[in-house]
């Protein structure tokens, strides 16, 4: 990187760190984007003058609130609630809600920042947002989860709406939670609208939304491998982390495309099944009774369970699809992947690779598909759910799945085109940042200083 470009990155990051002290995940996400866009911004004085990137890195609005609720013993519990309304240049704020004990402002701001670029990449009219709570649903009864969701929505309902801000699911927010959240919104606002996506099929949900992120990840990976390597999933060994929504449907599609998926994990440990994961067993454990992945090894002969999640990256594979959480692959894990023959890493989770891990991929010619492009399938189908809600009709599974596939293939094409235009042919990370940024930036310049 040239000296004046590096200086721009350093100055920009110094401001971000000073304005957002202690928010390390947010700094990490912004740094990755600034580093790849710096050259382009320096060549475009209008973007500099209009302080477009500075504005994109500052949320339009942050809502933080108290969520008091009653547990089954009748005791009062208090959690923190958040909604980050990051950017509305190209559409209403859009992004998931995460319930996890680790949730804080830094994590939600990094997710909302990434979401702005991701949503732009889908080519659908959606701005960026993210929300959540430090509520941990593990071990809570259905009634407790319902009371929490109702309390959370009681406050959130003031800030969202079908044309303003349309949340969806994320970690620990699936069909059950979206149902409770939707019910409470409808009760409070007396309004039946597509204010949330990921809804049940009976009340406005879209077919293929549940599968969308995992399937989309595989469509993206398959297309990138086809274009850049003249290769496919056929006959490949795949390592997947996580065993939630994204991991399950990534496994399903990778298997359908002819690959052997040999792992699944949760926050306690991972399973290795050399014969290929039996997905019906994983679904029964995770979707059937919210069990732990350890149970798989007790049920499937020939499989092994290992404590700790990091070991999953030492399993030899051709393709790795991280689908659990941020920063799950560090430098050491990336080196282990490469040493064991992995040549493709595409991200189902948000920001699962540390900057050091990405440097290892780049130094070893690994085909690297960054999260904001590779996992955009979920929000893309959320966008299609919004369209169906507006039309008041439902498309078939095949129709939605077909649109998803072409959106993911277009993301690969648009990223590669942008990468080529900016002199970094074949760089899917730079391409995704540039393609996602340009549309938002142009809209912001056109709309004036907001
Ligand atoms: P789920 O809650 O369905 O599943 C999350 C999975 O990841 C679980 O297996 C969970 O294990 C594991 N996990 C969570 N936190 C950790 C941790 N700290 N360490 C190790 N494992 C962990 O969530 P999703 O599948 O929806 O989300 C997974 C990732 O994909 C997230 O990064 C999310 O932001 C991203 N994503 C999701 C989209 C969607 O449509 N759902 C869209 C785009 C991105 P455990 O049960 O032990 O917690």
Image (tube, rainbow, N blue to C red):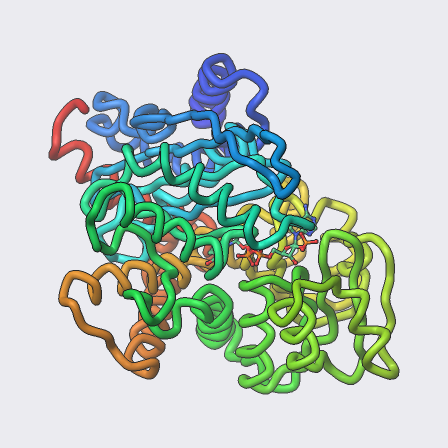
**Is residue 151 left or right of 407 when viewed as pictured?**
right
Looking at the image, the residue that sits furthest to the front is: 74
Q: Residue at x 40, y 34 (%)?
A: 83
Q: Residue 299 in the image: state x and y as whole percent.
A: 82, 79
* Horizontal side of residue 1 vs 72, given as left or right: left
In this rendered view, identify the residue nearer to me: 9 or 273: 273
Q: Position of residue 288 (x, y in %)?
A: 63, 72
Q: Quadrant of the C terminus?
A: top left
Counting labels gives 0
Residue 148, compared with residue 141, is above or below; it is: above
At 82% from the left and 81% from the top, the residue drawn is 300
Q: Residue at x 49, y 75 (%)?
A: 222
**Rendered-image quarter of ligand 1:** bottom right
Q: Position of residue 402 (x, y in %)?
A: 32, 79
The correct choice, above or below, for 169 with respect to 20 in the image is below
Residue 169 can be seen, yes or no: yes
114 shown above or below 387:
above
Residue at 64% in and 53% down: 361
Q: Nearer the viewer, residue 118 or 131?
A: 131
Which of the 4 quarters of the picture holds residue 112?
top left
Comparing 440 with 290, the one in front is 290
Q: Position of residue 133 (x, y in %)?
A: 52, 36
From the viewer's perspective, tell me whether residue 236 is left or right of residue 337: left
Q: Is residue 237 visible?
A: no
């Amino acid at each position: 990187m040239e000296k004046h470009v590096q200086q721009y990155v350093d100055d920009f990051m110094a401001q971000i760190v000073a304005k957002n002290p202690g928010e390390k995940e947010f700094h990490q996400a912004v740094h990755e984007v600034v580093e790849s866009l710096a050259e382009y911004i320096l060549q475009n004085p209008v973007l500099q003058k209009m302080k477009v990137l500075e504005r994109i890195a500052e949320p339009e609005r942050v809502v933080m609130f108290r969520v008091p609720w009653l547990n089954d013993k009748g005791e009062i519990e208090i959690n923190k609630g958040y909604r980050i309304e990051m950017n509305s240049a190209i559409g209403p704020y859009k992004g998931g809600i995460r319930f996890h004990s680790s949730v804080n402002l830094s994590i939600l701001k990094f997710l909302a920042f990434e979401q702005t670029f991701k949503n732009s990449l889908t080519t659908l009219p959606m701005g960026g947002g993210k929300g959540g709570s430090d509520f941990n649903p593990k071990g809570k009864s259905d009634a407790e989860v319902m009371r929490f969701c109702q309390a959370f929505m009681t406050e959130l309902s003031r800030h969202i709406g079908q044309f303003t801000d349309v949340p969806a699911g994320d970690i620990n927010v699936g069909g059950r939670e979206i149902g409770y959240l939707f019910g409470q919104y409808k009760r409070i606002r007396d309004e039946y609208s597509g204010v949330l996506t990921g809804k049940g099929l009976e009340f406005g949900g879209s077919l293929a939304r549940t599968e969308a992120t995992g399937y989309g990840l595989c469509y993206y990976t398959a297309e990138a491998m086809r274009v850049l390597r003249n290769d496919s999933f056929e006959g490949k060994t795949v390592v997947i982390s996580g065993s939630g929504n994204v991991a399950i449907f990534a496994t399903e599609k990778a298997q359908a495309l002819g690959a052997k998926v040999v792992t699944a994990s949760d926050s306690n440990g991972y399973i290795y099944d050399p014969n290929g994961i039996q997905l019906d067993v994983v679904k029964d454990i995770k979707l059937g009774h919210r069990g732990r992945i350890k149970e798989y090894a007790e049920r499937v002969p020939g499989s092994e369970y290992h404590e700790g999640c990091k070991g999953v990256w030492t399993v030899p594979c051709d393709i790795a699809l991280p689908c659990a959480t941020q920063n799950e692959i560090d430098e050491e894990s990336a080196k282990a992947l490469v040493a064991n023959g992995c040549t493709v890493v595409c991200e189902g989770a948000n920001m699962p690779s540390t900057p050091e891990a990405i440097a290892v991929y780049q130094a070893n010619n690994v085909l690297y598909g960054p999260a904001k492009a590779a996992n955009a399938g979920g929000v893309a189908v959320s966008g299609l759910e919004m369209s169906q809600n507006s039309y008041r009709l439902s498309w078939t599974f095949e129709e939605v799945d077909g649109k998803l596939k072409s959106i993911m293939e277009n993301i690969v094409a648009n990223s590669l085109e942008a990468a080529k235009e900016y002199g970094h042919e074949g760089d899917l990370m730079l391409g995704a940042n540039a393609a996602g940024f340009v549309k938002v930036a142009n809209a912001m310049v056109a709309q004036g200083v907001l």
